Image (tube, rainbow, N blue to C red):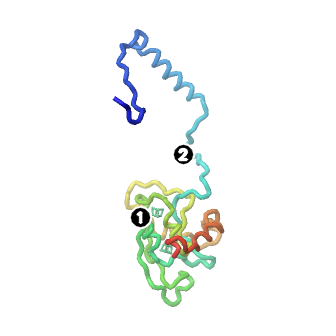
Amino acid sequence: MEKLTGRSKVVSNKKLSFWESIYLPAIIGGMFITIKHFFGKKVTINVPEQTRKRSDVYRGMHVLKRDDEGRERCTACGLCALSCPAEAITMVAAERKPGEEHLYREEKYATIYEINMLRCIFCGDCEEACPKEAIFLTDRLVESEYKRKNFVYGKDLLVEPVEKDKRIDVSKRQTPEVLEFKKNKKFTHNK
Ligand code: SF4
Ligand code: SF4
């Protein structure tokens, strides 16, 4: 019969020779490969004592940014949650009260902002969708946990520290090209 793909293989049922039937040559061959890798260059590292350098634009744990004056940039518009394919983001919006101008940059802010790190697929869509440069993925890893509920990260873990020397640097992701791209009204998510 004519083959459709040409990828099929004819399985041989030929009788094993004496050497094949005692399996010793195959075992010795396998041991040789194992010993060769034993003395070869290691491809693994000793975690957590050693760490591998991650890319500057690695998509790891998120950060909610503050502006230069230390105010939270997020205005709880919900665009990140809407763009999230994993439905990992939830938030509750609140009105900024008089006297809170030093805390929140916009008149509306997220009183609750949560990301379920077990749902997140670290695609970066939330970062791209945010019109306020408020959310970024970083090269930090999400810590391992024993309980599922501990993977729901709230503002206490997501908002960066107010101290300037402890801020999370996202300059490698926030390049002029990216900022220009975010202004381009040709793309629906920039409208
Ligand atoms: S990185 Fe992707 S999956 Fe994770 S919260 Fe952002 S949009 Fe959702
Ligand atoms: S992080 Fe950005 S997109 Fe998400 S709610 Fe805040 S301002 Fe809107």
Cα–Cα span, label 1 and label 2:
28 Å
> Which mark is on residue 88?
1
Q: Is residue 117 left or right of residue 51?
A: left
Residue at disc 1, CB closer than 8 Å to ligand 1: yes
Task: Where is residue 177? Give x, y as percent.
Answer: 64, 66
Dot 2 amino acid type = Val
- Where disc 1 sits, the SS reads loop
Position of residue 28 relative to residue 85, above or below, is above
Name the residue located 40 percent from the left edge and 59 percent from the top edge. Answer: 119
Residue placed most toward the observer, 83 or 101: 83
Task: Where is residue 59? Give x, y as percent.
Answer: 54, 58
Q: Are marks 1 and 2 in contact (CB under 8 Å)?
A: no
Residue 72, located in which quarter of the rendered image? bottom right
Position of residue 134 relative to residue 146, above or below, is below
Q: Is residue 20 left or right of residue 51?
A: left
Task: Where is residue 78? Give x, y as percent.
Answer: 44, 74
Residue occupied by mark 2 = 47
Residue 133, located in which quarter of the rendered image? bottom right
> Which mark is on residue 12?
none
Q: Is residue 14 left or right of residue 60?
A: left
Residue at disc 2, CB closer than 8 Å to ligand 1: no
Name the residue located 53 percent from the left edge and 74 percent from the top edge. Answer: 131
Position of residue 173 relative to residue 107, above or below, is above
What count of labels does the image hold?
2
- Sequence order check: which comes first, mark 1 or mark 2? 2
Q: Nearer the viewer, mark 1 or mark 2?
A: 1
Q: Name the image quarter holding the N terminus.
A: top left
- Where disc 2 sits, the SS reads loop
Name the residue located 57 percent from the left edge and 56 percent from the top edge. Answer: 58
Task: Where is residue 8? Give x, y as percent.
Answer: 39, 31
Q: Residue furthest top?
A: 18
How crowded pointer 2 is (Cα within 10 Å; few <14, some 14-19, many 20+) is rated as few
